[in-house]
Image: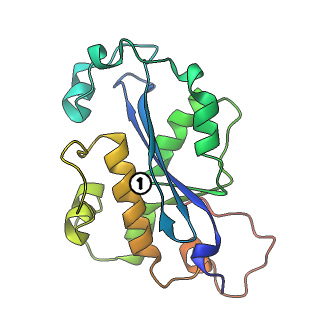
Amino acid sequence: MTDWKSLSYVVVDVEGNGQQPPDLVELAAVPIVDGIIGEPASWLVRPDQPIAPMAKRIHGIGNDDVAEKPVFEDVVVDVLHALSHPALIAHNAHVDVGVLQRKMTGWKPLEIFDTLKLARRLLPGRKRYKLGSLVEEFELDHGLDDEDQPHRAKYDAIVTARLFVHLAGRRSLEELRNRPPGGSSDDEPALF
């Protein structure tokens, strides 16, 4: 059994502009190395299309807030550096990964852990698995500044990192990957 802490992770969260397909407005990345949650990095960027009013109601970021911010191409090197961990974590990961793959053609994480799917598998019987519900249940937002709020990338990435560490607990990497003990080392990384 492999200790889950033997792998280095990066937790990501993106906030979009409310258009279809969604474009990036805010991105945060939080490393988890040796089981320890590191300092978050975050970027506000000016999307190609305006931020829809519905999206602004959710995350509070308006077109005026990003008017003077760089476009994504200006921060892509920093973002790639922040994402350069063997495993990526996100809550409802296909959304975040989809946006990032549209912005960075050819980019693909080596392994993905989706805390939504992990929570459903490891914490059965709950009525809700939304990030906010799990944050409230496990009090994962303690100690965050008042400026860090739900539906902002930095907040969501931090609480997702805390959720992952909570879910990982004393489990092995194989358990998180949902692989039986003694599985072949040449198995493909699981996409949760």
The C terminus: image quadrant: bottom right
Quarter occupied by residue 15: top left
Residue at the spot 20% in from the left edge and 64% down from the top edge = 136
Pick whichever, 115 or 30, lies toward us: 30
Residue 30, above or below 34: above
In the image, what residue occupies the spot 60% across and 59% down?
A: 191
Q: Is residue 121 visible?
A: no
Amino acid at pointer 1: His
Q: Is residue 151 left or right of residue 12?
A: left
- Asked if 169 appears above or below 53 in the picture, the reply is below
Question: Residue 17's image quarter?
Answer: top left
| Left or right, residue 165 beside residue 124 | right
Find numbered disc 1 in the image and state the secondary structure of the residue it sits on. Answer: loop
Residue at horizontal 18 percent and vertical 46 percent from the top:
146
Q: Residue furthest right?
A: 186
Q: From the top left corner, tell me how far across and down residue 106 is, in percent.
A: 71, 34
**Seen in the image, is 56 located left or right of residue 79?**
left
Q: Disc 1 marks which residue?
A: 91
